[in-house]
Image (cartoon, rainbow, N blue to C red):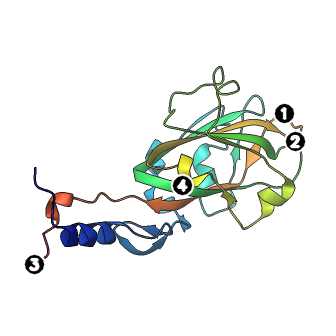
């Protein structure tokens, strides 16, 4: 086999390689973009949600909220319309006993249930404080662990002591991935 021209190879690599803060194929986007437009809102699911306070409320821009039904635990499954790189999560809740405290994140586990979630090793977990729940800053995620994500599962394992948990808003941050079709690359003319 013949090795490609080194100049062509450098041009290809420099064109494909983008800074870590950019989103491939989308000029002007960063790894801190709110991903609300790439969340498949019709596919969002939640185990143990109160029918009067469903999971969709946590993804709206209004005063509605998500509330658990018979105990403090929730498992929220968030599918994306396109694979994403996640860099942060913001969970907003009013301080108090119904605010979530121990939250575990899983990826690509849409069928995880309450029997598995407490014992499974999470990709990342948080012990949320009142400051975390009221801050405008997202909680940073271990970026290398949240690459090429199709579904995210958020397990609220415990709250601050109430019988049910309440979440006002969930926001996810990162970048949508767009494939690079290498067959479209042309060798530069020398």
Q: Name the front one of labels 4 and 3.
A: 3
Using the image, tell me which numbered label, if any, was put on residue 163.
Answer: 1
Residue 181 spot, x, y in % from top left: 22, 58
- The residue where tag 4 is placed is 86
- The residue where tag 3 is placed is 189
Near mark 1 (Cα within 10 A), the count class, few <14, some 14-19 or many ≥20, is: some
Mark earlier in primary sequence (1, 3)? 1
Mark earlier in primary sequence (1, 4)? 4
Q: SS for tag 4? A: strand
The structure residue drawn at horizontal position 71% and vertical position 66%, both measured from the top left corner, is 137
How far separated are the C-alphas under marks 2 and 3?
65 Å
Q: SS for tag 1? A: loop
Using the image, tell me which numbered label, if any, was put on residue 57.
Answer: none
The structure residue drawn at horizontal position 40% and vertical position 69%, both measured from the top left corner, is 18
- The residue where tag 2 is placed is 160
Q: Is 156 placed above or below 147 here?
A: above
Mark earlier in primary sequence (2, 4)? 4
């Amino acid at each position: 086999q013949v090795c490609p021209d080194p100049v062509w190879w450098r041009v290809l690599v420099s064109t494909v390689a983008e800074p870590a803060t950019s989103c491939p194929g989308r000029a002007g986007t960063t790894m801190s973009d709110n991903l609300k437009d790439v969340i498949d809102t019709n596919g969002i699911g939640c185990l143990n949600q109160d029918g009067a306070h469903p999971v969709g409320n946590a993804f709206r821009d209004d005063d509605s909220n998500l509330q658990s039904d018979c105990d403090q635990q929730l498992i929220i499954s968030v599918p994306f319309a396109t694979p994403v790189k996640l860099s942060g999560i913001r969970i907003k809740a009013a301080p108090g006993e119904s605010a979530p405290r121990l939250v575990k994140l899983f990826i690509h586990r849409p069928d995880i249930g309450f029997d598995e979630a407490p014992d499974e090793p999470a990709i990342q977990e948080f012990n949320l404080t009142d400051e975390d729940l009221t801050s405008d800053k997202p909680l940073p995620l271990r970026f290398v662990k949240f690459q090429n994500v199709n579904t995210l599962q958020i397990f609220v394992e415990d709250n601050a002591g109430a019988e049910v948990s309440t979440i006002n808003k969930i926001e996810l941050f990162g970048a949508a991935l767009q494939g690079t079709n290498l067959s479209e690359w042309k060798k530069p003319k020398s």
